Amino acid sequence: MNQTFKILLILFFSILLLFQNAESRQHSRTFYIDYNNGSDLNRGKSKYKPFKHCPFDPAATGYARSLFVQPGDRFIFKGDVVYRGIITIKKSGTKYRPILLDGNSKGTFGSGKAIIDGSDKINGFRRCRSYNQCKNKNWKKIYYAKIPFGITAITANIHEKNKMLTLAQYPPPKDPFYYDNRHEFRKVPVKDYSSTQIKDSRYFIQNNHRYWHNSYVIVWTGNNRVITRKIKRFVPGQHLIQFKSTLKYLRIRRDRYALLNHISFMTQPGTYFVNMKQRTLYIWPYSS
């Protein structure tokens, strides 16, 4: 009985090992990706005709988009090329046949390692030509360029090379990293501050009802909590701004706020403003 059990056990593991070896010997495919010079109309199987996008990138088109990814597939990104995109893994390999995303580990496709960067490079910057064009007294130091669809002032996260720029804010924070420091916010009487609007008769004195249409307000709701809201409406005659309710966050009525994203707030290098309707980015760079 024991001898029979041993034979069956050995037979079981032998069959299991056979299946594993068979799976690992199945044909694996290799695809090449070159963001700079590739094309999604290529088949991607040759380093001379690579894809531009990884099939897992929502921006992929053509053959890259329609490729049915299988266990064991390998995608080699060209070395020393910055891949700018979003990669969302939607398929799964197996224990013995994983799906591999390779940054040129063996140095066979390009030189050095590939770089995967989810950012978009913004080109075509121009210097502001007048105050009327940029509505800022520092207009000679401000540049502007068009940006892709879908970018907002809050999601832009602009960098100059490897140095982060900060969204234009009023009052300007001493340390941009602590933009939410309520002790540096503007103060108004408690009676002029509610969960849906703020009145400031000394500051909201502009005549144009669209003056704040690109801007946000940072609302202090109590303790160390602040909430950022898009300004929905500006009423010049009443000197107030209105925004989506913060009632569920409001502990008691507060008296401090700050404003984000207006071109007039660009008072120092390293700041930016986004005109979302015109899809235009304005920056005051660290370097001229």
Image (cartoon, rainbow, N blue to C red):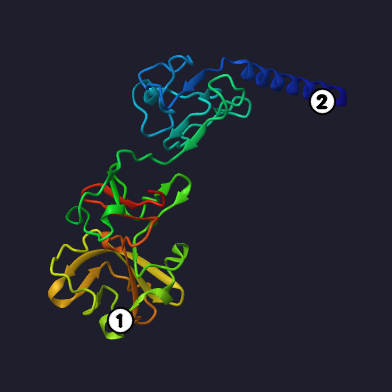
Mark 1 neighbour density, 10 Å: few (under 14) some (14–19) many (20 or more): some
Vertical order, 82 against 20 (above or below): below
Residue 151, horizontal then vertical, whole percent: 32, 47
Q: Quadrant of the N terminus?
A: top right
Say which amino acid is labelled 1: Val
Nearest the viewer among 127 and 77 is 127
Nearest the viewer among 7 and 125 is 125
Mark 1 lies on residue: 188
Q: Secondary structure at mark 1?
A: loop
The quarter of the displayed image where residue 241 is located: bottom left
Tell me the distance, in whole angstroms, between the alpha carbons under discs 1 and 2.
84 Å
Residue at horizontal 40 percent and vertical 70 percent from the top: 226
Residue 31, horizontal then vertical, whole percent: 49, 20
Residue 7, horizontal then vertical, whole percent: 81, 20
Given this view, does label 1 or label 2 mark the residue nearer the observer?
Answer: 1
Mark 2 lies on residue: 5
Nearest the viewer among 182 and 89 is 182
State how many labels appear: 2
Q: Is residue 111 left or right of residue 205?
A: right
Q: Secondary structure at mark 2?
A: helix
Residue at horizontal 44 percent and vertical 40 percent from the top: 118
Residue 274, horizontal then vertical, whole percent: 29, 53
Vertical order, 263 against 115 (above or below): below
Say which amino acid is labelled 2: Phe
Kindly indicate whether the residue at mark 2 contacts the one at mark 1 (C-beta within 8 angstroms): no
The quarter of the displayed image where residue 194 is located: bottom left
Mark 2 neighbour density, 10 Å: few (under 14) some (14–19) many (20 or more): few
Q: Which mark is residue 204?
A: none
**Which comes before the other along the chain, label 1 or label 2?**
2
Residue at horizontal 35 percent and vertical 40 percent from the top: 122
Residue at horizontal 64 percent and vertical 16 percent from the top: 22
Nearest the viewer among 266 and 84 is 266
